[in-house]
Amino acid sequence: MPEGQFLSIVGGNGSGKTTLLNILCGSVPIDRGEVRIEGRNVAKMQDYRRYAMMGRVYQDPSMGTCPSLTVLENLSLADNKGRRYGLQRGVERKRIDAYRQMLAELGLGLEEKLNVKMGSLSGGQRQALALLMATMTPLKFLILDEHTAALDPKTAAGIMELTDRIVRKKKLTALMVTHNLRYALDYGDRLLMLDRGKILLDRTGAEKAATSPEDVLSVFQRADMGLGFC
């Protein structure tokens, strides 16, 4: 992936989508080959060091946030990702105004809920915060792991619009796994389809823009019937 690309990955169950993400993040070891970020092989790098370079938003909003902590405390944790922790306060009071401004830009009224516990928010609010938290520090890579799948259609659409806005504003390199073909086609610069660990379809730019859901389903059905890759 070139820097700044927004890549969407689709494919059936067992196609390798989640395994690919776990390999990139280091939670699944590889048998051979390399995982390179900016030319550097990170395959044997410890998870916590690799995560200093990337952010990940999960399908389950609770996996990207701490439900027993307040919104302010969650933001403070995310703001300190990659830094050393010592015996000092977990929340820097001088950053509160900056946090409030970040939340206001989400358009969800969360700037008034800094002292509310994360677990009491709705799934959509928590996912919006998880997305914000994942991108607060400088990143090489943003990973979106079916991050709209657990949300109702209206909330999911809002989270996708927010995702696109953040990726473009911060000029992030992003990889999104999704089962929603419309989101895969409407957002991002490039589309991949996987099947049993193989790339079945790879379309970028104008070619991707001209691709319809029916085109993608046709390729998937051909593979499912054993008619070969397209």
Image: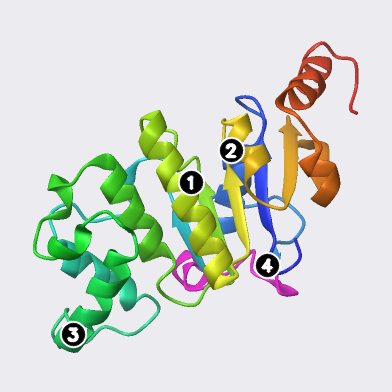
Question: Which residue range is magenta in the image?
Answer: 37-53
Q: What separation in Å lies between label 1 and label 2 (alpha carbons)?
A: 8 Å
Q: What residue is rendered at 64% in x and 41% in y?
A: 186
Res 77 quadrant in image:
bottom left
Q: Please, what secondary structure does the residue beneath circle 4 have?
A: loop
Q: What separation in Å lies between label 2 and label 4 (alpha carbons)?
A: 18 Å
User: Given the image, on which type of amino acid does mark 1 rest?
Assistant: Met
Q: What separation in Å lies between label 2 and label 3 (alpha carbons)?
A: 37 Å
Query: Which mark's residue is nearer the viewer, 2 or 4?
Result: 2
Q: In the rendering, at what x and y percent does residue 192 appear?
A: 74, 41
Res 41 quadrant in image:
bottom right
Q: Is residue 230 above or below residue 95?
A: above
Q: Disc number at residue 160?
A: 1
Mark yes or no: residue 27 visible: no
Mark closer to the chain start, 4 or 1:
4
The residue labelled by disc 2 is 183
User: Given the image, on which type of amino acid does mark 4 rest?
Assistant: Gly
Q: What separation in Å lies between label 3 and label 1 (alpha carbons)?
A: 30 Å
Q: What residue is rendered at 13% in x and 84% in y?
A: 89
